[in-house]
Image (spheres, helix red, strand yellow):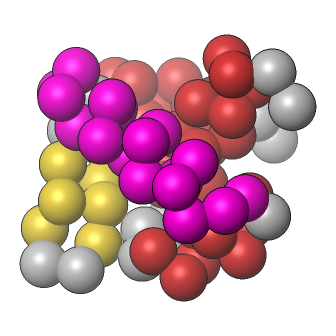
Amino acid sequence: MWIKEEYMELLRAIAQGKGTWDELKETLRIGDSTLAKLLNNLTKASFIEKVGERYRIQDPVLKFSLLSRWP
């Protein structure tokens, strides 16, 4: 998987409601260090935020776009 594809797959999974560490790891089938890096980068860039134990898309327009683009 290319790095850009990993970010898109991660964002798509979060948009679909898979927001816990275990859900994301199972969906993406990637290691802990890779998942941590991706989540950290997306959080720093303000694409996602962590609320309790779940990650979520901050921007509703981005979330809508991710859900619309990926049937």
In magenta stretch: residue 6 = no
Q: Is residue 30 left or right of residue 63?
A: right
Q: Residue at x 30, y 54 (%)?
A: 56
User: In the rendered image of this protein, does residue 38 appear above or below residue 35?
Assistant: above
Q: Position of residue 30 (x, y in %)?
A: 72, 59
Q: Residue at x 58, y 30 (%)?
A: 7
Q: Residue at x 23, y 37 (%)?
A: 43
Residue 42: which quarter of the image? Answer: top left
Is any part of residue 6 visible from this angle?
yes
User: In the rendered image of this protein, does residue 39 appear above or below residue 46?
Assistant: below
Residue 52: which quarter of the image? Answer: bottom left
Looking at the rendering, the stretch of residues picked out in magenta corresponds to: 30-46
Q: Position of residue 33 (x, y in %)?
A: 52, 55
Q: Is residue 68 left or right of residue 49?
A: right
Residue 50: which quarter of the image? Answer: bottom left
Magenta: main secondary structure: helix
Q: Residue furthest left?
A: 52
Is any part of residue 60 visible from this angle?
no
**Which quadrant, please, contains the N terminus?**
top right
Q: Residue at x 39, y 25 (%)?
A: 62
User: In the rendered image of this protein, does residue 52 appear above or below residue 38?
Assistant: below
Q: Residue furthest front?
A: 33
**Which quadrant, please, contains the C terminus?**
top right
Closer to the camera, 70 or 34?
A: 34
User: In the rendered image of this protein, does residue 10 appear above or below residue 56?
Assistant: above
Q: Is residue 49 left or right of residue 35?
A: left
Q: Position of residue 4 (x, y in %)?
A: 67, 17
Q: Position of residue 65 (x, y in %)?
A: 53, 24
Count of marks placed on residues: 0
In magenta stretch: residue 43 = yes
